[in-house]
Structures are given as structure tokens and as C-alpha cells.
Amino acid sequence: MTQSHRKSIRFRLNDQTVELSNIAPDQTLLDWLRLDRRLTGTKEGCAEGDCGACTVLVGRIDSGLLTYETVNACIRLTTSLDATHVVTVEYLNRPDGALSAVQQAMVDNHGSQCGFCTPGIVASLHALWLAEPNPSEADIERQLQGNLCRCTGYEPIVKAAVDAAKTIPSADNDRLVAAYDATTQALLEFADGTGAIIEHDSGTTFVPANVDDLAEIYATHPEATIVAGSTDVGLWVTKHMRDISPVIHVGHLEELKQIKIDETGIMLGAGVSYTSARGALVSVFPQMAELWDRIGGEQVRNMGTVGGNIANGSPIGDTPPPLIALGATVTLRKGETRRSMPLEEFFIDYGKQDRQPGEFVESIFVPPLAEDVFYAVYKISKRRDEDISALCGAFHLDTDADGVVTSARIAFGGMAGTPKRAPRTEAALIGQPWSWETVQAARAVLAEDYQPLTDWRASAEYRMLTAQNLLIRFFLETCGAPARIERHPALAEV
């Protein structure tokens, strides 16, 4: 290889420097913390990133600034932590050893009963306390989406977050603030641009120095598992016991975390997390806001990436339907060669994407909406928050001055083996007035576009009926729901 590589990864764990040269590619951060370091405050609950008992903070230099985010240690791979600062609940008390503002507020407001979930909740609220000086109740609830508490109830926990915010973080009351400059310097020294290759009896881990290094490594090892945020791959390890070696980590690569916005649209690097992408996408497509805040919990949104959600090809991924409806394109890279295609063409069949061996998703481009077009996204799931979609539908429609449909793009996830457009339904709309009669006719055509399956998330009948009803919802929201409901009693039969 043309790039030199270290034989170890280096990071900070609380107030210590750690260097690891013999660690398995599938070693989770949770197991390493508990078994190797005996930091047992971090708990294992679900082992799939849902309950938040394993929450820790991970700090990384981003655009020159040290920022901390919550992550699920149960599915985060230890070898992904090069040049980071891992902070566990044991390190969140004050520099003088007293309880932190968040910990004390949890005590004062009786925010803990059995206590199993408490360390993860404290970690999540500590991250919010550092980042948001005056959080709203909505901010607090969003921060706690990924932390489940089965016995206390959230009211005293929310009150604790409100009380904690009355104390401003400073070097006197928070260890992370006190050590901010020293930690920043340490992480900058760790990120020396060399990358790392770690050999272990169970397999090899590659930490590329840059995207060119990634392209070279993956072309040489096309059988490798690319790991960005491990929100999916982590479950391959904890739930399916799969061998994922060799592993190539890409979540640290700055080139893949670029976001560019201009008059032509938005370019997202494949390594942009859901959290990082939200501001750009919602500023241009406010219709995505509700969907985006229902993708996992805060920890999953901090770890998971838009490119990863596309690359794994899941038929129920939350991001492909809204992006397909917008006419997004994806750019793939193999070595020095790049090619782009419409996102909808990337998905071939269940578990199969148009991606050659050694080729990876490099970026996604999303064109802007034209003026006066209709666009909406709907996610249907059993739970409102932190749940997988039963189906996700996106609608993008334009009409002329006479109200006749001139273009339509409809895409669903969860209705087929891949995220898929509805070409027959689109054709039934184009050239017709955007009216109740047109929508009713198009609603019936949806059954020609999709033959959904029955599984534990939903039955085929439920999926089809819901998809048809979402088309009606889209019509009502774009034409004035109250008047249409009064005018069309047939809605009661839908």
C-alpha cells in the first residue's frame, strides 16, 4: 500500500490515554469497557442500540472543534475510536468529586428508581447540558428518545434536565470543560494522518488515513465489511454473531463528512451522520423534519449515516423513499473511478445493490424543490419514536396553473424487496386534475405497483391500505383537509 499505517489505535478514555494493538474487529465498546476496564457503570440492556443503558459520550475533533455526542456502546466497535475521547458515567462527576449538575438534579427530582437505566440517562442529559444552555421540553424529550426507563417515568427526569440547565457548565463544575484544551491537543496529536491496520487472531481492522487510502484498501480487500456508524453492522455482531472481518472503518474520514449547499442542490458525503445532515436537509426540505427526528434515538442519529442507510440496501430504510421522490443521485467510487446514477436504480433486488466488488458509496446529491410543488414524507411504525418503519412513503407532485398534474414521483419503503417508485400510480396522476376523483382512481392503481409482504411489522393488507390512505392524506393536506372531508363522505369508508 502507498499509505503508511500504524499498528495500533489511540484514544482517550476518561482521563487516560489508551493504545490498542491487539483487539478483535468485532469487539464492542461496551464489552471492552466492562470486561477489560471494569467500568461497569455502563450497562447492557438490549444490545441493539434501542434502550440507551449503554450510553457514553464520544468526543471528536470536527471542523477544528472538540464536540461530544452520545453513542450506544453496545453496538459501537472499539476499533472505530481512533483519535476520540470516550467518556463514561464514572467520569461525569465534578472535578472536586461532588455530583455533577445533572447527577444532583436527578437525585433532587427523584429521577431514578431501579437505577439500571440511570447511567445512560445521565450521560445523555450531560451531553445536552454541555450543548444547550436553555433546552426546551421538546429538546429534552428528543435527547431522551434513545433512553428507555421502565419504572421511574419521564416527568422527574425531564424536571431534572430543566434544573440542571440552571447551572452553566464551567471548568469548576465539569471535567470535560476543565480539560477541553488538553483533550483537544491530545486528539489532534492522535490524528496524525497515518491511519492504522490492526491484526488480531480473529481478523484485521483497517482505519484508512483518507478516502484515497480507503479506495485502495477496499479495492484490494473487496470482501471487507465497511463500517460507518455500526448502527446496522453492530447488530450483525450482537444479534447474529456474524463474522465481519476484515473491517474497514470510514466514520472518521472528513472527506466523507462534507456537506455542500448551492443553487443546484445539496451534496452529502456518505459519512454524514443523521445528526449532521438534519440542518442542511430540513433547511431546504422542511417536510423532512418530522421523519428525521423519528430515525432511531439521539445516539443512533449521532452514529448512523445517510450513506450507510443507502448502502446496506434495506427495503425499510428511512432515507431512500424521501430522497428517491426528490430525484436524488448517488455517486459510487472504485479506486480512482467514479460513476453516478439515480438513487432508485441503485436498488436492484432484496439484499442486492448495483455496487461492484471494491466499490463504495461516496456521496449523495439531492436537487432542490421547484417553487409551488407539493412534497411530503410519512413514516408509519408501531411506536412513534425509535422504531423501524412498517412503511415509509414520499410524494412529490407538481401541477400547472389549471391544477393539472404535470409530474409525480411517489416512492415507498416497506412495500417491496427494495425502496421502490410507483410508476403506474404516477402515470395515473399525470395529465389529470389534482382532484378527489383522480386520487381515488390512482389509489386503486397502487395495488398494481406493489405486492407487499406480511411480517411481524405489518400484514400485506395493512401495508397496502395504509399506502393508499397516505395518498389520500397527501391530497387532503395539499388541498385543504377540512373542506375535502366534508365534501367527500366516502372518506369514512377508507
Image (cartoon, grey):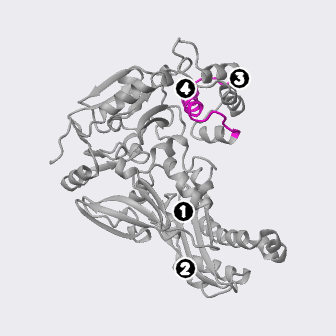
The quarter of the picture where the C terminus appears is bottom right
Q: Earlier in the sequence, mark 1 or mark 3?
A: 3
Answer with left or right where residue 151 lies relative to residue 180. Answer: right
Residue at mark 4 to residue at mark 1: CA–CA distance:
38 Å
Q: Earlier in the sequence, mark 2 or mark 1?
A: 2
- List the residue tagged with mark 4: 119
Q: Is residue 275 above or below residue 202?
A: below
Q: Earlier in the sequence, mark 4 or mark 1?
A: 4
On the image, the x and y values in percent for residue 384 come to 64, 50
Answer with left or right where residue 163 lies relative to residue 279. Answer: right
Q: Is residue 172 above or below residue 285?
A: above
| Residue 137 location, quadrant | top right
Residue 122 in view in this figure? yes
Q: Secondary structure at mark 4?
A: helix
Q: Is residue 126 highlighted in magenta?
A: yes
Q: Which amino acid, mark 2?
A: Glu
Q: Which amino acid, mark 4?
A: Pro
Q: Is residue 448 above or below residue 456?
A: below
Q: Residue at x 42, y 48 (%)?
A: 232
- List the residue tagged with mark 3: 109
Cβ atoms under marks 2 and 1 closer than 8 Å = no
Q: Earlier in the sequence, mark 4 or mark 2?
A: 4
Mark toward the viewer: 1 or 3 = 3
On the image, the x and y values in percent for residue 167 come to 65, 24
Answer with left or right where residue 490 lies relative to residue 370. Answer: right
- What's drawn in magenta, residue-wise? 111-137
On the image, the x and y values in percent for residue 218 come to 24, 53
- List the residue tagged with mark 1: 454
Q: Nearer the viewer, residue 328 or 38?
A: 328
Crowding near the residue tagged with mark 1, few <14, some 14–19, many ≥20 C-alpha atoms within 10 Å = few
Cβ atoms under marks 1 and 3 closer than 8 Å = no
